[in-house]
Amino acid sequence: MIDLVYSIGLAVLGALLIAVAVRVLLRERVNFHAFAGGMAALLFYWAVIVAGSETQRMIPLLAGLSWNWSGKVVTIAAVLLAIAVLPWVTREEAGLRLRLNPGSLVPALVCAALLCALSWGVEAWMNDGRDLSAERLLYQALMPGIDEELFFRGLLLALLLRAFDERWSFLGAPVGPAALVVTFIFAAGHGLGVADGQIRFDALPFCMTGALGFGLLWLRQRTGSVWPAILAHNLINVGNSFF
């Protein structure tokens, strides 16, 4: 548990360094109160995941399962509740809408296809074996995309957009410092952390997750909705099971 605390602290520190660099080096506006709100949301997110995962062993129907169903379900519910009750985040800002931005459907499909090709290609190259168990396929088709997109490209992005000016653009989608912070935190959760009291950096997972995370964020910003990112995320994860 202490290593997880240190790992989260390392991610927050990295995010803070990005914010400071944006303010000092790029001389862009940074609202550090709003930034602190985003980091508080990150701590809340991880606390809910840990608490939710601990309940799985206490539920007879879930105790024998291999994947963290309870942690994801509790986290999804908590994030949706936060979006509903927080006065400074609207559903629209969190991407909770079915309507896509005009002209974004084809770019979204192209982006999703490229992300799938990248992830599946790396999985095939690594050749670490396929896992087609029913539980894994069902879990990967539902849980990670809903949980992680609702938080990272939904709630967290909405909060950090209040901290930075997103005046940059990339292929028709507004991206900027908030996008960099969200992408870094997402990548750090998969490739940068603390284990046995030492900082560990795994370059391939960090870079791969960062690339996929940025692609999913672009998808969310280009379409204006988080749902395409959820679908693409889950499709990537299901496809990875076959390689």
Image (spheres, rainbow, N blue to C red):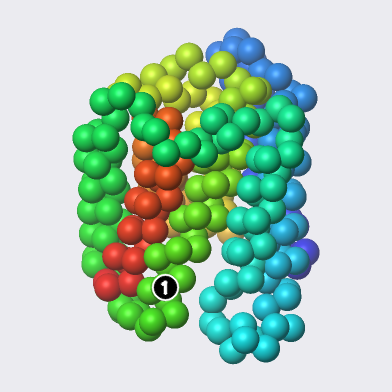
Q: Is residue 42 shown above or below 21?
A: below
Q: Nearer the viewer, residue 4 or 137?
A: 137
Residue pointed to by mark 1 = 138
Q: Nearer the viewer, residue 96 or 51?
A: 96
Identify residue type, mark 1.
Leu
Tell me if 131 is positioned left or right of 51 in this view: left
Residue at 68% in and 40% down: 84
Q: Image quarter for residue 120?
A: bottom left
| Image position, residue 21 (x, y; %) | 61, 23
Q: Secondary structure at mark 1?
A: helix
Residue at 61% in and 38% down: 156
Residue 191 seen anywhere in this rendered image of the structure: no
In the rendered image, the quadrant that contains the C terminus is bottom left
Tell me if 164 is positioned left or right of 221 in this view: right
Tell me if 63 is positioned left or right of 128 in this view: right
Q: Is residue 191 shown above or below 56?
A: above
Q: Image quarter for residue 57?
A: bottom right
| Image position, residue 11 (x, y; %) | 64, 46
CA neighbours of label 1 inside 10 A, class few (<14), some (14 to 19), many (20+): few
| Image position, residue 189 (x, y; %) | 57, 54
Residue at 74% in and 39% down: 85
Residue 110 seen anywhere in this rendered image of the structure: yes
In the rendered image, the quadrant that contains the N terminus is bottom right
| Image position, residue 36 (x, y; %) | 75, 32
